[in-house]
């Protein structure tokens, strides 16, 4: 378990979800996938959107709630597995667009679906040690699934940005974090490949469930806490069922999960998924509420966090669009449009 | 300043000249214009908007002078987007008026069909503000469409209000052997045609085409030697404004057109109402409308109504596009101003055949570069 | 391949960085060509559609059918920009819009991705 040396918290948060949706039924229609789909529908980025543009909007929202100038940020770190450039950090563009000063660290992080929380843990380290006043961590993805593959039903797009800063300005203070990592090849993408491969049911028990449980139990044990001590919990959500199941296994009640469970409506936003769930939970939480967040990244690892909401949350919540504003802004597209926009129309 | 005259004209049809290069077209027009003029050409101004980008040839002055056997004379390209032709004509006028030369050739030439549509749109968009308009996806047509939408909103017109312009242009082109589209169209056809850049309709939109036109500008002495009615360049002016729409104080006022028309009228000592026949940049009805208003032919917000009332017809008070204009004669982009000079010379000399405007004495030509950022205006007067 | 050209424009393009005229105090956007030493001013990104049109045939490198607009920014300047996140039929003169940073162009597998401002209807009113 790691704790910041100085009192540290999340001082601003911002969500972004693109307006387009494709339903599971529409994807199933293409591939004779049968009636049941892992999520009802998923978000799809517009043709002019990518990880960078989504990170910029989420970042702007986070700055508004943090009520700090972009020039006060010491780092802009973007976690994603869909960085638009293989070499040239997304953070360079995002920092420039946010209006950060040139004396800043900007870098990209990659750890499958937990790249965003990797950036968050690093931000906690820099701020919690007193090295930086504020650091922004973003999780963002425009994830791709191979046509007809199970992943295509869920691989979605979204971004969430958190600004870590001093606890006295926090909307939620950070109690502690704990990370677990093993070499578990449940899902990966080789360097020159467009689509990832996954191990079907191997992604379940040894991968998602094993790592999330280890991280969550480890943090609860070391904090001397019980699931019932938390008002809310957010898990990585590759589909609707996994977070519900792992929550139950760990002893959380459905209502603790509900506010942050966005997968049924927007799919798996990969690096953004657990952080977007946290943003949605912040949209309803009250001062004093404790929130647990557990991300998961294939490969594999999990990051668990224990947070406590302050009374500043209610004061800044409306300074930027709440998560549901983006989710309810919904334009359905068909598979042909989806395939065209996502570059899936390829001869050969 | 000496008086200057148009003493020779030549042109090719505007269209798809697959078998002719830019230089071939230019030489055809130039030789035709030089036909009656025995004395040697002393300078050559080549009007061309897209040469470097589309034909892959810059330094067109040297290229054409060499190809036409005019090596050794002063020769250069004049570029001001769609106003290139008028700008080059003005350079010839100044060169002769100043006494530097007695006989100067102006060749307007454009070759667009060597590229596909996308690159041509990109080349045409070079006349817009590069960093803040073209780089954001604006095209020339879409720029005029922005102004049409605003015009409709401010003055309360429907998009059908602009149909009289292409209808008039096509009616006139039907009897012009050199026109690109020699058929009439109805207002209903314009309205039913697809919107190529909403709110602009396909049939209210000129097609950029290949073509060349040439005129010989000379002194009064040369003009008198040739005999017959003379065409004097009585007014010549070019004004530059802002390429970007956003930096204009009034979106619906073409300031450069206003200034250049005023100066040309002042030089010619005539009023707009004295004009017998006129040619404008009329790629779309909105372009002609804004030009008519800025140049003093129509009150603000009234040009479509005047067109609907028949004033722009060949027998109306303001005969416009008498050979078909950009819409139906064809739009050879940077050559436009030279085509205008060729056609209006014919009108003033009574040589316009079935398209003749009765007793035409005073003619007005204006061509615009970009979205009216450059305007070149000429007033031509017949002398007997 | 143009690299420096896009780099020079990153402030105005990414975040609508305007400049203040040193004598008149007027806010200028786009920044005039001789304004390199003037102070940068952050614009709100709020504006109103003054006119709009669809691009039928796009120039090379752009997508057919995009929607262009003239937008009067809250601080006064009028700019030309694309609208996004709406259909042509949904646009009206007077529509309130806000700036977002999106992809303007993708210059291909060996080229830059050019980012810049576009405008969308106010999120709060969708």
Image (tube, rainbow, N blue to C red):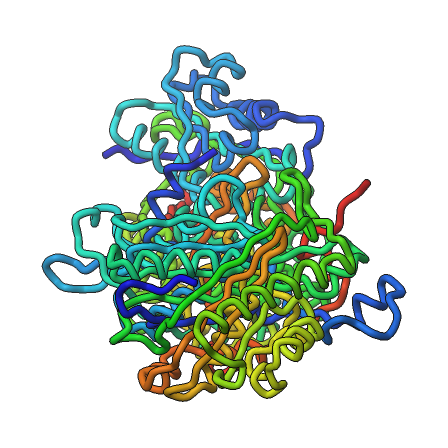
Residue at horizontal 44 percent and vertical 36 percent from the top: C2
**B270 sits to left or right of A344:** left
Quick check: can you spot residue B148? no
Counting the numbered discs, the total is 0
Question: In this image, A19 relative to C41: left or right?
Answer: right
Image quadrant in which the N terminus of chain B is located: top left
Quadrant of the image for the C terminus of chain B? Answer: top left
User: Picture quarter containing residue C78?
Assistant: bottom left
Res B300 quadrant in image: bottom left
Residue in view at x 52 percent, y 67 percent: A218
Up-down relation of residue A192 to residue A229 (above or below): above
**Residue A186 image offset from top left, x and y in percent:** 70, 53
Front residue of A215 and B289: A215
In front: A212, or A277? Answer: A212
Q: In the image, is residue C26 above or below residue B91?
A: below
Taking depth in this image into account, of C64 and A244 the one nearest to the observer is: A244
* Residue visible at 51% across and 81% down in the picture: A226
Q: Position of residue A245 (x, y in %)?
A: 69, 75
Tell me residue A139's x, y (percent): 49, 61
Q: Is residue C50 above or below residue B49?
A: below
Q: Is residue B160 left or right of residue A25?
A: left
Which residue is depicted at the point 65% across and 73% down? A246
Q: Foreground: A263 or A49?
A: A263
Whether residue A226 is visible: yes
Residue A303: image location, x then y, percent: 51, 62
């Amino acid at each position: 378990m790691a704790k910041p040396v100085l009192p540290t918290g999340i001082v601003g948060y911002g969500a972004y979800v693109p307006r387009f949706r494709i339903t599971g039924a529409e994807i199933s229609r293409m591939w004779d996938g049968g009636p049941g789909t892992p999520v009802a529908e998923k978000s799809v980025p517009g043709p002019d959107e990518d990880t960078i543009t989504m990170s910029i909007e989420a970042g702007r929202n986070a700055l508004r709630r943090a009520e700090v100038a972009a020039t006060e940020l010491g780092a802009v770190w973007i976690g994603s597995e869909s960085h638009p450039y293989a070499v040239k950090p997304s953070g360079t563009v995002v920092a420039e667009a946010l209006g950060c000063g040139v004396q800043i660290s900007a870098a990209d992080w990659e750890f499958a679906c937990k790249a965003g929380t990797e950036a968050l843990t690093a931000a906690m380290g820099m701020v919690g040690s007193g090295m930086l006043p504020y650091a922004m961590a973003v999780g963002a993805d425009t994830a791709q699934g191979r046509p007809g593959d199970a992943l295509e039903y869920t691989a979605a797009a979204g971004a969430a940005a958190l600004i870590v800063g001093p606890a006295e300005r926090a909307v939620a203070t950070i109690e502690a974090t704990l990370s677990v990592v093993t070499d578990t090849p449940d899902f990966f993408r080789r360097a020159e490949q467009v689509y990832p491969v996954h191990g079907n049911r191997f992604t379940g028990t040894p991968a998602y469930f094993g790592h999330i449980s280890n991280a969550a139990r480890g943090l609860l044990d070391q904090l001397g806490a019980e699931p019932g001590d938390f008002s809310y919990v957010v898990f990585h959500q590759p589909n609707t069922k996994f977070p519900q199941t792992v929550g139950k296994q760990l002893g959380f009640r459905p209502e603790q999960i509900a506010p942050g469970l966005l997968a049924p409506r927007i799919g798996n936003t990969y690096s953004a998924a657990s952080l977007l769930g946290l943003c949605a939970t912040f949209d309803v939480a009250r001062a004093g509420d404790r929130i647990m967040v557990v991300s998961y990244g294939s490969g594999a690892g999990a990051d668990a966090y224990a947070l406590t909401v302050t009374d500043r949350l209610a004061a800044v919540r409306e300074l930027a669009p709440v998560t549901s504003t983006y989710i309810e802004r919904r334009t359905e597209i068909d598979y042909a449009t989806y395939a065209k926009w996502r570059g899936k129309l390829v001869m050969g | 300043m000496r008086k200057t005259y148009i003493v020779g004209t030549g042109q090719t049809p505007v269209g798809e000249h697959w078998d002719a290069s830019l230089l071939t077209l230019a030489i055809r027009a130039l030789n035709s214009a030089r036909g009656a003029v025995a004395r040697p050409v002393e300078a050559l101004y080549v009007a061309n908007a897209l040469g470097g980008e589309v034909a892959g040839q810059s330094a067109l002055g040297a290229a054409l002078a060499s190809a036409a056997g005019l090596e050794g004379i002063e020769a250069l390209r004049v570029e001001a987007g769609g106003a290139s032709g008028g700008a080059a004509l003005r350079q010839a006028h100044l060169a002769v008026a100043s006494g530097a030369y007695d006989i100067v050739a102006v060749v307007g030439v454009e070759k667009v069909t060597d590229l596909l549509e996308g690159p041509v749109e990109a080349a045409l968009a070079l006349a817009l503000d590069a960093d803040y308009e073209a780089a954001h996806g604006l095209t020339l047509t879409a720029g005029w469409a922005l102004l049409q939408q605003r015009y409709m909103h401010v003055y309360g017109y429907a998009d059908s209000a602009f149909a009289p312009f292409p209808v008039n242009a096509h009616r006139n082109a039907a009897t012009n052997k050199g026109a690109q589209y020699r058929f009439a169209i109805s207002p209903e056809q314009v309205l039913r045609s697809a919107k190529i850049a909403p709110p602009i309709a396909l049939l209210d939109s000129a097609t950029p085409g290949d073509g060349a036109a040439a005129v010989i500008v000379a002194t009064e002495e040369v003009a008198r030697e040739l005999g017959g009615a003379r065409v004097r360049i009585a007014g010549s002016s070019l004004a530059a404004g802002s390429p970007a729409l956003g930096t204009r104080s009034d979106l619906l006022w073409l300031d450069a057109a206003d200034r250049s028309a005023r100066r040309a009228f002042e030089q010619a000592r005539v009023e707009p109402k004295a004009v017998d026949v006129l040619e404008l940049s009329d790629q779309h009805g909105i372009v002609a409308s804004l030009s008519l208003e800025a140049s003093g032919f129509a009150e603000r917000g009234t040009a479509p109504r005047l067109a609907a009332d028949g004033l722009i017809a060949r027998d109306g008070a303001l005969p416009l596009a008498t050979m078909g204009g950009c819409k139906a004669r064809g739009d050879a982009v940077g050559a436009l101003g030279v085509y205008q000079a060729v056609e209006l010379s014919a009108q003033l000399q009574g040589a316009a055949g079935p398209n003749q405007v009765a007793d035409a004495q005073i003619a007005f030509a204006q061509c615009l570069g970009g979205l009216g950022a450059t305007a070149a205006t000429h007033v031509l007067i017949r002398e007997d | 391949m143009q690299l420096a050209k896009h780099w020079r424009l990153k402030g105005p393009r990414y975040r609508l960085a305007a400049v203040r005229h040193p004598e008149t105090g007027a806010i200028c956007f786009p920044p005039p060509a001789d304004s390199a030493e003037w102070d940068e001013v952050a614009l709100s990104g709020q504006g109103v559609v003054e006119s709009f049109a669809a691009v039928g045939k796009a120039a090379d490198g752009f997508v057919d059918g995009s929607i262009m607009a003239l937008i009067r920014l809250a601080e006064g300047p009028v700019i030309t920009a694309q609208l996004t996140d709406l259909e042509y039929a949904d646009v009206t003169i007077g529509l309130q819009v806000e700036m977002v940073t999106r992809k303007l162009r993708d210059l291909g597998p060996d080229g830059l991705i050019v980012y810049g401002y576009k405008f969308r209807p106010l999120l709060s009113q969708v």
